[in-house]
Amino acid sequence: MGSLGLKLHEQTPNFAIDLIRTRAMIPSVFLAFLVTTIKSDHPPLTFSEKCEAFISRLSTRNNFWHRVCSLIWLPYAFRSGISMKSLGTDRFVAILPFRRINRNWYNAMAGAALLANSEVAGGMYLFSRCGGEYIVVCKKLNYNFLRPCVGPAVYHVVCREELAEKLATEREFNIEIDLEIVQQVQGIGAKRERRVGRCEATFHCAPKAMMKARRLARR
C-alpha cells in the first residue's frame, strides 16, 4: 500500500499536489474570490477589482447578503425592503413589501416606488446571471401603470433574448427584459393575483476586464 502511494505521488505533477493541498486549506468561498471566471486577453484584474467582483457575486447569493450590500451601496433598496427569489435558470421573482416608505398619501403603492424598484429587480436578475465580472447599467425603462397596487408587489422577470449565448461571447451587449408586476394576494380562498403594471427595460452589460482595457488604451 505504501509503494502504491509512492508511485501515485511520483506520477502526480507537483502543481497538482499543490493545488490539492491548497484546495483543502482554503474554503471554497475564498477560492471563488481568488479565481476569475472570465478568461480572455484582457489585462488581469487588480486586488481591488477582484474584491469588487467577489462582493457583487456575494450580493446575489441570498437575501441576507443582498440586504447587507444594499445597506452600504444601495440604501434605497435596503429601505424599500425588496427581496429576490430565483425560480430556475429563466425565472426570477422580486417582492416589494407594502411598507410605509413605499406607499403614497392615499395608502397605495407609490408609482415612484414601483418604477424605481423595476430597475432594481431587473438589475438583480442580470447580476445573478452574469456574475460579478460584469457591469450592468440600465439604459431604458418603460413602465405602464395599469391599476393601483394596495398590497405587496411581485416582479416577474422574463428575459426576451438568450442570455447564455451573449455571455459566451465575453463581449459587451444590450439585452431587453420584461417585468410583469402583480399585487400579491394573501389568505386562503383569495382571488388570483392582480396585474398592476408592465415594464420593459433595456440593460447594457459589459465585462469589467474589457472596460479596464479600454481605459488603459485611452491613456
Image (cartoon, rainbow, N blue to C red):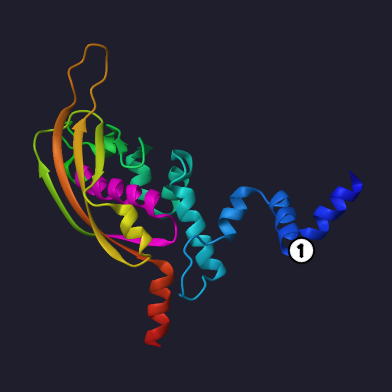
Front residue of 124 and 162: 162
Q: Position of residue 179 (x, y in %)?
A: 21, 43
Residue ID for mark 1: 14
Residue 161 or 131: which is nearer the viewer? 161
In magenta, the rendered stretch is 113-137
Residue 121 in percent (x, y) is at 29, 45
**Left or right placement of residue 165 versus residue 56 in this view:** left
Q: Residue at x 91, y 47 (%)?
A: 2
Look at label 1 and name its amino acid.
Asn
Residue 203: tell me if it is visible: yes
Residue lying at 47% horizontally and 46% vertically, measured from the top left: 68
Q: Residue furthest right?
A: 2
Magenta stretch contains residue 133: yes
Using the image as rendered, state which of residue 123 and residue 116 is in the foreground.
123
Quadrant of residue 141 in the image?
bottom left
Q: Quadrant of residue 165?
A: bottom left
